[in-house]
Structures are given as C-alpha cells and as structure tokens.
Image (spheres, coloured by chain):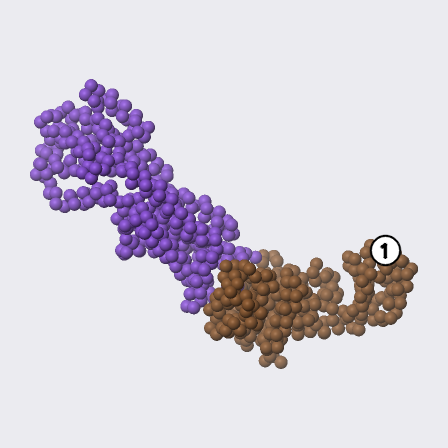
Amino acid sequence: MADTVLLRVVDLAKHYGDVRAVDGISFAVDAASVFTLLGPNGAGKTTTLEILEGIREPDAGEIHVFGNRVNRIGRTVKQRMGVLLQDGGFEPYLRVHEVMRLFASFFENPLPIDDVLSRVALEEKAGALVRTLSGGQKQRLAVGAALINDPELIFLDEPTTGLDPQARRNMWSIVTGLKTDGKTVVLTTHYMEEAEALSDLVCIMDKGTVIANGTPRDLTQAFGEETMIEFRGDNLSDEAAEGLRTCAEELRIDGGTVTLETSDLPATMESLLAWSRVQDIPLRSLTVRQPNLEDVFLALTGRRLRE
Amino acid sequence: MKAVLFISLTHVATAIRERVTLFWFLIFPVFMLVILSMIFGQIAEEREISFDITLVNLDRSEMDSSGFAARVTDAFEGLAGPTIAAQAPLFTLHQPGGAQAPADFLEAELNLLRRGRRAAVVVIPDGFGNAVLHGVVHTENDAQPAMINVYMSRTSIASETATEIIGQVLAEVDRAILIGAERFDPKDEIESRAHWLRQEEAETRYIDFLLPGIILMAFFTNGLFGVPGAILFNRDRRILRRYWVTPLSVPRYLAGFSLGHLALCCLQFWILFLLGRYGFGATISFAQPDALLTLVLAAATFMAFGFLIAAVARTANAGMATANILNMPMMFLSGMFFPVSGLPPLIMAIVYANPVSYLVNGLRVSLGVESSFFQPALMVLVPLAWIGLSVAVAARKLRWDVER
C-alpha cells in the first residue's frame, strides 16, 4: 500500500528552547483520505501542521510528500497544496472576489473564481467587503482561498473552531465533498465528534508525541465490547461513590459527570437503579453509549481533550 | 508578475477604502495645502516682504574725497525708496538724526535688534573709506582690510534673510568700486547675482514654495504611517501568514507592495499638483528630470523609512506610536512649510540629520523656488544613505510572521 501514501512524516521534531512542541512523531497519510490529528490545545498539532505547510522548518525528521523526500516545503510543493490556517486573516477592505483573484494570482493553474465561490456557497457575496462577512462566511472564504489551485493535499487547521453548529455542519459537508472528489485532507481538531464523523484515520497527539494511531473504530474497539453509562451526579458522598464501584468494572467521576464502564449492561443497570433507590439519588441525564475517542484519550492520558 | 500586480492593487484598494488611511494619505495633505496657502499665501501677497534695517555710518576718514561710505549709504537708501511697480520698498531704513550721537543711536538700535524689532544693523566703521582706498583701489599690501559690520539675530528667519540681501547689496557696491578702479570684469558675475535677487524676492509666490513641500509631506506620511501600518497590521492579523502558505515569496510580496506604494505616491502627486495649479494658481512645472528624480528618491526614502519603523517596532501599535513621535519633528524641521535657516545650532543639527530636509530643499532647488541650502551632492547622498541604513536594518530585523 506504500504507493498510495501521499504524505509521510518520520521522527519529526520541533523544539522552542526547552519546550518540545513536536517530539519525534511519525505518521502516514493515504491519498484520497481524511487524516485527523486529534489532541488538546498545546498537543503539538498546529506546530506539526505549520511545518507541513512550510511556515516553520523542523529541527529533525523526514517529510515525504507527493512521492519525494523534501527538507522543507517549497514553492513547487505549495503549488499542489491548499491550506486553511487556524487564525489566518484577510484584508478587511477587499471584496470577496478580489480576495479570490489575489490568491488565484499566486498559483500557476488556478480554478475559475466563480466555480470556487459556488463550491463554498459564497457566490452571492462575491461583491461584499470581507469586513461585512459573518464568522462562518469568512471561514468559507478561507476554504475557498485554500481550494483556488485545485490542490491534491489540503490542510485544515481546526476548521470549525468558533463556528456555530450550522456553520460547523456546513464545514463538515465541505470536507466530506473534498474526500468524495479524491482530495487528501489533513485535519486538526480538538472535537472528538468531528474526528469520528470525518476521519478515515486518527492520530491522537499529546505533549508533542503520538499516543495512538488508527481508524476511529479501531481506536474505540480497543475498549472491547464495553458500554459506557453516564449520568449527572453532583456532590456525591464518599459512601455513595463507594457504592457505585460495585456496579461496574470501571468508575470515573469527573466534575459532575459519573461514567460507568461495563461489559454486562443489564446487570450494571440493575445495580445502578438499586443504588439510586437506596441512596435516594436521581439518575439525571442518564445516557448509555458506546466508547468514543474522548474515552480513548481519557484512558490514555487521564485527562479530557478539552481540559 | 501577476502576483506582484495583484498585491500592488490590493495595497492601493485597501489604502483608498480605509477611512483612516485615506485621511492621512490624501485628505490631510489636501487640507494642509488649502489651509496654508489660504492663510500664508494671502499674508504674503498683502504684506510684501520688507525688512527693518538700521544703517550707522561711523566713518570719519576722507568722507568727501572718496565717498566710499556714501556709496554704501546710497545703495541702502535706494532700496528703501519707492519702487517702480509701486510695491512696498525692500528696506525700511533707520539712520541717526542730525542731533543724535551715532554711538548712542547704535546702542539703542542693537537693543531693538535683540528684541526682534530690527532685522539687521549695518555699521560702516571709522576708517572704512581709507581702507577701501588703500586696500581695494590702490592694492597696497599693508593696508587695513575694508570691512563692514552686519549685526543679525541668529534666531530670526527674517534677520537671516535680510542679512543675505545685505550681502548682495554690499557685493554690488564692491563690484561698482572695482569696476571704477578698472580691476573687475563684470561680464561673468552680473547676470547670476541680479537673477537670484529678482527670482527669490520678486517672483516666487508662497504657493510655489508650499506645493513641493506639501507633496513631499504627503509622500512622507504615506511612507511613515502607510508602510509600517500595512505590514505590521497584516502580519499581526495573520494576513501575511496566509500568503506564506502559498507559493508567494517575500521578495515578490515586497515588489508588489513597493509598486502599490509608488502608485499611491503618484496618485497623491497628481491630486495635489492639480489642486495647487488650478485651485491656487501654482506656476511651477515638475516636468524636468531633476524634479522627477527627486520625487522618486523621496518616495523611495520615505518607503524605506517605513520599513525601518516596521523592523524596529514589535507590534502594529508600537509602529504607529513610533511614526507619530517622528512625524512632527521630521516634517517641521525640514523646511517643508517654512524656511529653516536661522534656527538655533542644536535644532539645526536635527535639520542636518533629517533626510527630509535634503529632499525638500533638493526638490525646491530643482524647481527654482529656493536657493540651495545644502551641497548638491548631499541632497542625493544623504537620502541614499538613509535608504541603505533602513533597508539593511529591515533585512536583518523585520519579521514577516507573528512570533511564537
């Protein structure tokens, strides 16, 4: 399968003084797939992406892209890449079509501007000044600018951060559409549901290192056949908490959320209901679900993704 | 090349559409041109230049036989009399009355000079006639040098100007004496001296003096505020970062930015020039190589200065603060609006270090509305040195992306 790999990173490292922002990570991204770097803030996702986008140079490691090993990401590679920065801005006094025309001028073979604006649903805003756009519209413009050269490899750095639910769904459909068109997408996010919904492969990062790597299904199946039961349990006494431990194999009390991990759902539910009656504690917001990437991260680091 | 063109168009479009930028880049220079030409242009036309001059003749030697001191007196009295065009005389001449002791009169007049009531005091010392007769006419080696004392105030621009004119008057007298003594061939000298006096004092209007200064002021504020403003704000708002993930390189961005900046300078020039010519009757023509080259040099110098500020300022706000601190002293201590000659030595040191002074004077000299204040070579070399320094610092220190 080596011939399908579009991007490969081996032992990549970047240090800022004593801070090891990226500490010898390795991964491979297949062509026509969505690859997600998942991790909390400060995990090293953005630094990794900045190196791959050509903004920063690595201190060590190898980068193989489009079948070639490169020391740094130069102009030739950038002609085939599209980048959506986490915090990039636009000239507020340019019009939307002027921004697209400007970015089109940077590339040898840009797509027609109207086609790209149509793809990101901004054709009606073509004459509007950037400063008058909403947050979601600005983000779609940024995606449009990243797609103007019809790139084979697209980096999307936290594309939905700060967006409302509707705008987030719109962004998800754009990413799905890119994959359908055969594009390779490298995504960073700290939303586990986003990673699960969009990714073919997830690489979980923490403190500059890769702590898990695989498909969302593979990663969550590492938990076996267990089921998660959650409910709100504020201010539980030590005695009440001790009673809960007998209900399931694993118990986590995180803030006001109680999570039970069990391989025998009927038995655990029976015990839990009995505990609720005896302790006179209602099971508010009771949820039964399968393990997700948040659980994987929590199990691996002892912390939540958004802590 | 396409990227360079579109970066330059972006720079121009942003400058024109953003109100604050538009104010400093265009409205402020137009406002200054209108205000200054309305106030000072009118004053200059209504109150033609006239200086209060004191003349004291202390010469007792051969007064009647040679009449050299009398020739000097006649020359000044001639300029204090009515003119052919019924304009105000150049000098209002103050001389001791018949009963007044010349020494007492002189002391009183020097006090008036110190208080700014006189532009200059000219004293013909005792023995002047003899010194001219023996030293100049007969060329005796052991004769005393012929000397006239001119007292002036170093802090008064009027005094400085009057002293220059007095120098011309004395040179005319000297020339007449030498011709009389058959020791001087006038054909090489007369034309240039007479021409300078007519052009500077009789024909130059304030708008012709002001317009080149306002055009350079517009270039200056555009460079000082526009360049660091655009670069630092674009860097801090991560606009530049978005460019750097595309194939666009820093040199190509710089080329586009510089082209856009020069296009803005051209726009500023044409608007101010047309307003000056058709709104206020300016008569100067910029269509000459010296003037055009000076304009290009000025735009390049101020743009480089903007890069220097962008390089030393850590943030956009710091860049604007630095530009604000430098703006007023560099503008006003350059002769942009008023002549700087006659300022105190400490202030003159700033004038000499200020590249704007050389460009302002160089442009006016090339347009024939001001005499040369600096060595001609310095008018090019000093701005070039500032460009070199600014580019060197910017190349070393200017950050094109936000710090991590």
Rendered-image quadrant of the C terminus of chain B: bottom right
Instruction: Determine whether the residue tagged by mark 1 lies in a helix, strand or loop.
Output: helix
Q: Can residue B401 be seen in this view?
A: no
Which chain does brown denote in the image? A
Seen at 32% across and 48% down, the residue is B280
* Relative side of B162 to A230, left or right: left
Q: In which quarter of the image is residue A28?
A: bottom right
At label 1, counting other C-alpha atoms closer than 10 Å, the crowd grade (few under 14, some 14-19, many 20 or more) is few
**Residue assigned mark 1:** A238
Find residue A213 and report its image quarter: bottom right
> Looking at the picture, which amino acid does disc 1 mark?
Asp
Query: Which residue does the image show at 64% across and 62% down from the upper left?
Result: A163
Q: Which of A79 and B393 is in front in this view?
A: A79
Quarter of the figure with residue B160: top left
The residue located at (81%, 60%) in the rendering is A232
Q: Residue at x 29, y 38 (%)?
A: B46
Question: Total marks drawn?
Answer: 1
What is the drawing colour of chain B? purple
- Give x and y (percent) for residue B97: 21, 22
Q: Which chain carries label 1?
A: A
Out of B190 and A37, give the one closest to the viewer. Answer: B190
Q: Is residue B221 above or below residue B47?
A: below
